[in-house]
Image (cartoon, rainbow, N blue to C red):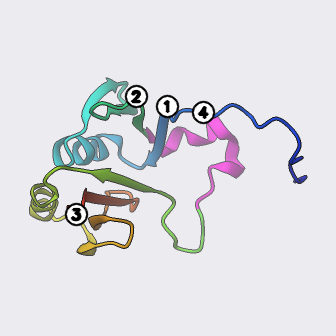
Amino acid sequence: MTQPDPTATPPPSPTLHIAILFTADPARSRAFYGELLGLRLALDAGVYFEFEFGGAHARLGLLARRGLPGIIGETGARPWNDGAPRAEVYLRYERVAEVIARLEAARAPALSALADRDWGDRAAYFADPDGHVVAVAEPLRQ
């Protein structure tokens, strides 16, 4: 990879349109993100789902992993072998305790308890059905 030319005009700044997570069971993940986390379903294509965020133009997509090689090829579809999670979804809520109670009642795997974080949020971490990290947070009140 070549180094960028610092004198060149920078590319235009993009907006996030869709972040897509690859899932073994899209219907199970649909229930996790829709029913437990309260995201609003915008598209249901059976093996692919999209959720909208309140007031934002970005969406979260869930795509069946089995179709991934046909989209990005076999090499790109290989999992990481070091055991690290592949993605984190960071969601902010007004009343995060209510969301945590729902996740706990559904027995979502807890990764880190609710705690004040250095960056100004109170956040807890869970794993979704495919092992992606999901943070649920609220801003610390000053």
Judging by the rendered image, the residue that carries numbered circle 1 is: 17
- What residue would you read off at disc 3? 142
- Report x, y in % for residue 28: 27, 46
Q: Nearer the viewer, mark 1 or mark 3?
A: 3
Hey, what amino acid is under mark 1?
Answer: His
Q: Is residue 60 magenta?
A: no
x%, y% of residue 65? Answer: 49, 45
Task: From the image, tell me which residue sits under label 2.
Answer: 57
Q: Which mark is residue 14?
A: 4
At 77% across and 37% down in the image, what residue appears?
10
**Could you tell me how far apart the alpha carbons at marks 1 and 3 are, in whole angstroms?**
31 Å
What separation in Å lies between label 4 and label 1 (alpha carbons)?
Answer: 9 Å
Q: As shown in the figure, which amino acid type bears the numbered disc 4?
A: Pro
Q: Between residue 3 and residue 52, name the one nearer to us.
A: 3
Label 4 and label 2: CA atoms lie apart by: 12 Å
Residues in magenta?
Answer: 63-79
SS at badge 3:
loop
Whichever of labels 4 and 2 marks the residue nearer the N terminus, that label is: 4
Specify the amino acid type for callout 3.
Gln
Q: Mark 1: which secondary structure? A: loop
Q: Are marks 4 and 1 in contact (CB under 8 Å)?
A: no
Quarter placement of the N terminus: bottom right
Q: Earlier in the sequence, mark 3 or mark 2?
A: 2
